[in-house]
Amino acid sequence: MALAFDEFGRPFIILREQEQKSRLRGLDAQKANIAAGKAVAKILRTSLGPKGMDKMLQSPDGEVTVTNDGATILEQMDVDNQIAKLMVELSQSQDYEIGDGTTGVVVLAGSLLEQAERLLERGIHPIRVAEGYEMASRIAVDHLQHISKKFEFGLENIEPLVQTCMTTLSSKIVNRCKRPLAEIAVRAVLAVADLERKDVNLDLIKVEGKVGGKLEDTELVYGILIDKDMSHPQMPKRIEDAKIAILTCPFEPPKPKTKHKVDIDTVEKFQTLRVQEQEYFDQMVQKCKDAGATLVICQWGFDDEANHLLMHRNLPAVRWVGGVELELIAIATGGRIVPRFQELTPDKLGKAGLVREKSFGTTKDRMLYIEHCANSRAVTIFIRGGNKMMIEETKRSIHDALCVARNLIRNNSIVYGGGSAEISCSVAVEAAADKHPGVEQYAIRAFADALDAVPMALAENSGLQPIETLNAVKSQQIKEKNPHCGIDCNDVGTNDMCEQNVFETLIGKQQQILLATQVVKMILKIDDVISPSEY
Ligand code: ADP
Ligand code: MG
């Protein structure tokens, strides 16, 4: 694109390869962008809430994903409109920062765009709309802080944490056993949490899944679980007080880096080579034994000869363990990763109270449990389920629950869910609009209307009359001055979310409002779209 001037000094824009580009300007550009954003939000709208629907997505290579998680749905969709991609990123940044609320944030952004469109049609300048939205979002965020509640919990009293995780899980396929899963998530987070610094390193929680069994068999392992078995079937299946050598060097004769050639033309030479090789293996095993190792975990494989020797010398071994797992094992057992046999010393060994091999069902599937580790901060959540799709979705749901628990440890404020917080904010923003004399008041009011989209979607997805339900709840909130009234999605009989124990984290809700506003402001400010035209 280049800017040029005609003979009267009027500027005009030259597009390179003009006929191949299409261009939208002014209100048309904004309207097209808003339409694209709304289209994405419309897809996610039906997935919101405990009665939300799941989406089934098929990737180009035929893999099927069934999910209810906003970020995952958008990630798997092949979106090629630039504005729609912004919505995808919006959902992902919510996922990245908070972990939960990825559907809600897109629904909110879609509704903000819808309201903005009306204002633009009435001739209000996009910048004024953007400014009004900015003010309104600040009012809403402050109001959230105002209606939030501190949640006290300790290691003995984990119930509040469990309740909040249960709210997150209630909108997933796994809600059938949300209680045990929420408890697992909370205990896992507490096991790795640093309560003094109020921080949680989620990397220390590994989530593993194996097809088979049922969801109820999902368990929390205080230690590490690896999808490997002992290298030889006759090795012991249970090692107590294991001293683990963690090796990244193979049990193999050394290979010179330079090109080499060995000519073996006589039987004697062959014999010598064989003896030599055996000696190598023997030395390696001896080095491990000398250091006091009772279990060897090796990143590489070893051939039958070495395997046999290890079994013979009574040194159990596990081979082909991935780098990430190796690192986790090293962290958990307090051992060091050893790259050469010469460097193996007793103080580099990891320690674990119990290493056991467990087999599942009638298959030959086996897993290795490394428990009671020296540094017990690493834990594993082991998910069981009927099929791979179920396991993958459970992993995503558990991830949401883990994030929620972590957020609560960082900041223990909560707001009530079920749309109650949004309705309360909407009322507050609406009231604040009257105090603004300028044109912005229209945008602020529009923001208040947009906030209603979340409870409305919740009601609609639960088979309730959206507008009637929303109005009833809103007037109840105002009449009773109770910001906890929300949408009774599960038909429990009360719409007080406090009684229903539907909580969400304060920072999650605030982030939703901030992120959605930001993206909408950005979209509104675009008034010229130049793209390669279709042909
Ligand atoms: P997100 O990806 O945005 O977290 P969800 O599908 O998890 O989307 O839905 C979250 C919404 O559902 C929140 O607004 C939450 O308050 C609401 N919600 C969750 N459980 C309940 C419930 N039992 N009753 C009413 N609303 C609920
Ligand atoms: Mg959720």
Image: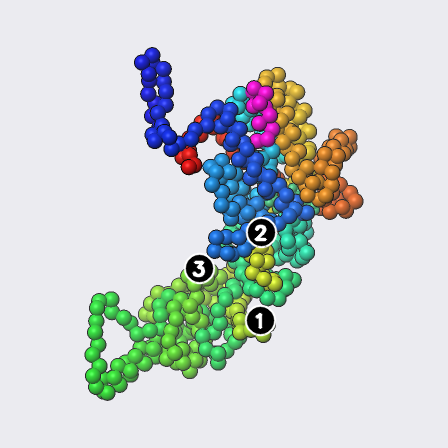
The label shown at residue 360 is 1
Which residue carries the number 2 mark? Answer: 56
Which quarter of the rendering shows the N terminus? top left
Splitting the image into 4 quarters, where does residue 10 fall? top left
Magenta highlight: main SS: helix
Determine which of the numbered discs, if any, sits on residue 324 in the image. 3
Q: Is residue 155 left or right of residue 90?
A: right
Question: In percent of the image, x 39 and y 80: which residue is there?
Answer: 309
Question: Dividing the picture into quarters, in which one does residue 122 lie?
Answer: top right
Name which of mark 1 and mark 3 comes first in the sequence. Answer: 3
**Residue type, mark 2 in image:** Met
The residue furthest front is: 535
The quarter of the picture where the C terminus appears is top left
Contact (Cβ within 8 Å) of mark 2 with mark 3: no
Closer to viewer: mark 1 or mark 3: 1
Q: Tell me the mark number nearer the camera, choosing from 2 and 1.
A: 2
Name the spot of residue 45 as percent of width and height, x first.
62, 41
Position of 309 compared to 71: left or right?
Answer: left
